[in-house]
Image: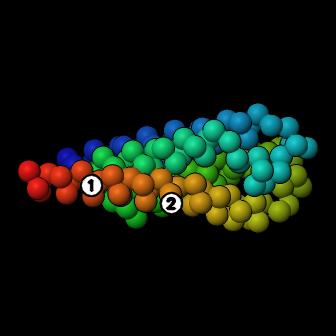
Amino acid sequence: MATEKRTSWRLSAAFLVGMLSVGIPVWLMPYSKLNVPSALYGAGLVVVFILAALLRASGFSTFSRTLHVLSASVPAALMARIVVEGAMDPTKHNLWPLAIIISAVVGYAATAPGVILGQLIYRLAHREDKTQ
């Protein structure tokens, strides 16, 4: 049980850091300049990649859980903007479902290589433990 809480805490923290790293640049961008997926590209996705690799390489989370949780941080960042701006002007985001789908694809495209790299590092580290 303690291990599960530790894993949940780390996954939650990684999700929050990933969401903020992608979200802050997107949230600061004027609506007229916002273009999905171009607005999502940048340092935020690199942070999501690195978080995925580190979380999986450390063994704190499974491959699948790391992939899905960190991938969800990208569309969550965009959804936060859509909710806030939609509350102010409901006609502003009329294509939001398409934007969320595109951001989810971008999230998986950034997270999957990181999780795969982390899995390779994890396996190499545990292979060396068994041979010694």
Q: In this view, does 5 lie to the left or right of 94?
A: left
State how far apart marks 2 and 1 are (Cα): 18 Å
- Residue 112's tag is 2
The residue located at (74%, 65%) in the rendering is 97
Q: Position of residue 90 (x, y in %)?
A: 85, 53
Q: Position of residue 49 (x, y in %)?
A: 52, 48
Type of the residue with mark 2: Ala
* Along the viewing direction, whichever of 112 and 132 lies nearer the viewer: 132
* Label located before the other in sequence (2 or 1): 2
* Along the viewing direction, whichever of 5 and 91 lies nearer the viewer: 5
42 w.r.t. 38: above or below: above
* Along the viewing direction, whichever of 15 and 89 lies nearer the viewer: 15
Q: In this view, does 46 lie to the left or right of 89?
A: left
Quarter location, residue 64: bottom left
84 w.r.t. 123: above or below: above
Q: Which of marks 2 and 1 is in front?
A: 1
Q: Mark 1 points at which residue?
A: 124
Q: What element carries label 1?
A: helix
The residue located at (43%, 59%) in the rendering is 116
96 w.r.t. 27: above or below: below
| Label 1 CA crowd tier, 10 Å (few <14, some 14–19, many 20+) | few
Is residue 53 visible in the rendered image? The answer is yes
Quarter location, residue 54: top left
Quarter location, residue 46: top right
Type of the residue with mark 1: Leu
Q: Is mark 2 on a helix, strand or loop?
A: helix
